[in-house]
Image: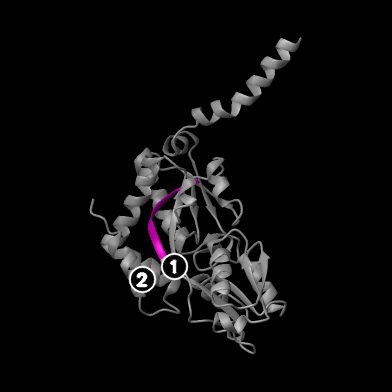
Amino acid sequence: MRTIVSLAAILILIAPALDAAEQLPTLEQIKQSGKMRIGYRQSEPPMSFRDGEGNAIGYSIDLCKQVVEAVKEKTGRSDIAVDYLPVNAQNRFSALQENKIDILCGATTKTLSRSELVDFTQLTFATGASLMSRQEEPINTLEDLKDKKVAVVQGTTTEEVLDAALKQTATEAEVVVVDSAAQGFDLLKQGQVAAYCSDQVVLIGLLLTSESPRRYGVSEQTFSYEPFALAVRRNDADFRLVADRVLAQLYRSGQILEIYGRWFGQFSERIPSAIAAVYQIHAIPE
């Protein structure tokens, strides 16, 4: 009896390893299932968010739609369906690792430590951490946060850089950790925090999609470098190459300017130099 129990325990332990080893490459999975799963953040406008009808929209979503078309061509299946699956700052990378989504589309900063968990495509955008506040109590600099509360989403690079920046400027402020951009913005609306800290482009998107945009302001100061990219599973070079080819072609052809204008044109007539550099540097020849 003991031998049987021990053998069963061993089989249970090695089963996950066997499943991981047998996992098909992403392109093959999509070809066999006829389905591509896009993970996205629901409240990160204008990068990725939901419209009034609950549809996933945004700058990063448009890029991923282009990837879907390329995958259809690569797999020879024009009938591939797309599932848009919400993720948050805490589970977005594990969703890739656990094969719950195929690609992560949103406002995701590419870092070396995160590259231990997932692979990243070429860069898609560049921004920096900043602050949003109410017009009646403007917060323009980190020093303005002295003895005040500031909200930030847990598990983001912004949380890390905010903590470091407050220490560097010797600013005594209470950091309130939240689960989403929507929650952080709600605290700001309710006056429970003096500011909400996030990537500047996300703050501008939240402001423009709010019911009363004139009630809030976004600081011109940024205190970090946040290079955005799409994320895919590690060591799946064929699928990553499909996405990289799509981005490079968008940059080379200038089609990216149309997508940029659709989501940023209303508050940025000219493309910032940092973003223009991203497009130029990653317009890799075929």
Residue 235, quarter of picture: top left
Q: Which kind of residue does numbered mark 1 sit on?
A: Tyr
Answer with left or right where residue 25 lies relative to residue 40: left
Magenta stretch in the rendered image: 117-125
Residue 20 percent coordinates (x, y): 53, 31
Residue 185 percent coordinates (x, y): 64, 73
- Would residue 272 be counted in the magenta stretch? no
Residue 263, quarter of picture: bottom left
Residue 260, quarter of picture: bottom left
* Image position of 12 with respect to 112: above or below: above
Q: Of the numbered discs in the image, which one, if any, rests on residue 274? A: 2
x 41%, y 67%: residue? 126
Give the residue furthest to the left: 285
Give the residue furthest to the bottom: 136
Q: Of the numbered discs in the image, which one, if any, rests on residue 225? A: 1
Answer with left or right where residue 57 lies relative to residue 176: left
x 50%, y 32%: residue? 23
